[in-house]
Image (cartoon, grey):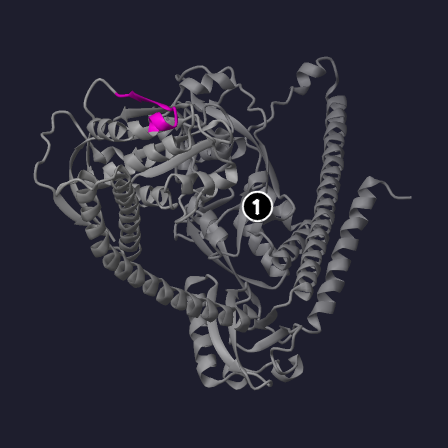
Amino acid sequence: MFGRAGFVRWGRVGAVVALLLLLGLAATDSRARAVESLRVGSELDYPPFAMVDDSGAPTGFSVDLFRAVAEVMDLDVTFTVGPWNELLEDLRAGRLDALPFVGIFPDRDEYLDFSVPVVVTHGAAFRRDDGPRIESDDDLADLRVAVMRDDVGHEYARSRPWGGDVETFDSLGAAFDCLAAAACDVVVAPRLQGLLLIKERDLDGIAPASLTLEGFSLAYAFAVRAGDAGLLAKLNGGLAIVAADGTLERLHRTWLPEIESRRVIPVEVLLPYATGGLAVFLLVVTVLYVRQRRATGLADTRGRSLWRQAEHLRQLAARLDDERARAEQARAEADALIRVMPDLFFRLDAEGRFVDLHDPDGLALRDLDHLRGQSLEAALPEDVAQAAREALMRMHETGEAQPLDYALDLLDGKTHNFQARLAPMEDGGSLAVIRDVTEERQREADVRRAAGAMATVSAAKSRFLATLSHELRTPLNAILGFSEVLSQEMFGPLGSDQYRQYAKDVHVSGQALLRLVDDLMDITRIDSGRLALHETAVDLGAVVSSKVAVLTGLASANRTEIRVIAPDHPVRLWADEGQVQRMVVNLLSNAVKFTEAGTVEVSIEDQPDAGVALVVADTGIGMSPDQVANLGDPFYQTSPDVARGSGGYGLGIALVKEMITLHGGRLDHESVLDVGTTARLIFPPDRRLSNAVVPVTVAQSTTVS
């Protein structure tokens, strides 16, 4: 019944009627409102779409089109003129509401929403007639290419291998001025704008190269900030109206005329033998045919344009439905998460009034109906409300979540401690997550009291050990002295060999007890932080040799061989010589005591960058992983029977560990049960003295706490 042109014509009428009905329905609740005002940006020099006239006012195809859309949609428009890149940034930042002529790029979908397209352009590479030849896209790599900054030509250049080194200008006219002055070799820009600019400025000798820029085809449309669906719907509705009433066609004829005249074949060439009357007749028929073809083409074009607009609106509606569904799903997930959490949740508006509440344990003392709309001051004690206000101020100033600790008296008659965290929300309000931490605070107080009691007990223990050690040392010195006099028969023979042996046994036992007293005193000094380092130059090899000589008798008794592997040069340390001797003798004596009919190997590893390590490796009874983990605890013995038989008390390794820590080093153990143990006493690099350093003869004392 209807042809395609009739469908298009009635489609236009239907679109206009539908929009007028929608506007009529909306008018019932919007008559009292003021006309909506929009801030719109317009470029300085982008003919024929956007530019300024002699008075500085914005003009051009896109400006007039936007004004026509604003008029039919009852929108008040204020134009701001500026460079394109600044206008685009102002739109992204919210300082503008819309731009009237923006290329549709996928990368811009993240921050812009587009109307139905209003113009489709193709790109071209403009060159001077005397400039370099351009036959392919690769030829542009060696040329000076000029583009308008952040324009479609700039976007296209960024996608090409040669696009990283182009000259950018604030306007397209400035780019063509560069080309005309031979400061640039080529300008990449939309073909239509370039031809219009060449014609307007009479730039002779500049024309598009015979080169097709693959992929440089761009649709232009109105642009708003992403998510501004209301304004976008108004602009699309206005475009449908101006397309249906002929305004869009009129603006096309005004601003986008044919650039190049079409060459027509003369009639006398086609019909050299026709009569004048026939020529006139054929000419009339040809004109009517051309007009009919143009009318049909225009109808097809309008139909396709409206079809694309409708398809864009359908896609926009589907996109909005998807966004709404995702938002509802996210809200449902958030509500479910809140419901299963045991904490108290408050939602406050921008003024600090209660909006919503989740209170599974009844901590708020009242329900939402009583709290909704109340301020913090009305719902909370004065001191708590003031602290909450200060936290909200810090949150709004910094944009970050803020903690809040406070105490409240609840209905059980007890004071409860609460810990809150206030986080900002997009609507200017805030979300408060509150937890009752009374039990946690009580546990912390109990731990502090227990720690204080332990510190008191430890101090009392240290004082007791110090006193006991001091009181035992005096009689022990007498016992050692008199037993040595008796065993050596300094004042005459004792009369029996048994007496001499008894005196020697007393002397040996006294020395063992004195070593225990010394160890206890050192442990006490370490606990109280009073152990001092008397630092001087120490020859580690000499210390090892002297202590190996002392332990030769014990090694012989255990049928154990001691091997010493030392470097071919002296290894000197800046350390406490007495403590170094005690560490060496404790490690060696442990290795010998727990090795029977085996070997003990002592070596010194001198690595300037890694420090100095004394390594004691034995083939003794070894230790399990659990025993190695406990090694170094005071009075811990891996093999109590062997230790008691050799006079050990479980303090030797503990003292070595503390003394090497005071020197900034460490003690490592590797052991395998029934295979053997390797101990590594490691001094840090700053303790090593080079051979060129003369040993200091006067010791320096450093108290380590």
Q: Quadrant of residue 455?
A: bottom left
Q: Residues within 10 Å of mark 1 (few under 14, many from 20)?
A: few
The residue lying at 59 percent from left, 72 percent from top is: 346
User: Residue 532's x, y, as percent?
Assistant: 20, 49
Decide: is 290 above or below 365: above
Q: Quadrant of residue 4?
A: top right
> For mark 1, what is the residue?
110
For the residue labelled by badge 1, is the local secondary structure a helix, a strand or a loop?
Answer: helix
Q: Does the image show residue 104?
A: yes
User: Residue 306's x, y, as percent?
Assistant: 73, 45
**Left or right of 553 on screen, residue 559:** right
The magenta stretch spans which residues?
Answer: 555-566
Tell me which amino acid carries mark 1: Glu
Q: Residue furthest front?
A: 495
Decide: is 665 above or below 240: above
User: Residue 182's x, y, as percent?
Assistant: 34, 24
Q: Is residue 556 magenta?
A: yes
The residue lying at 77 percent from left, 22 percent from top is: 278
The residue lying at 73 percent from left, 22 percent from top is: 279
For the image, the number of numbered tags is 1
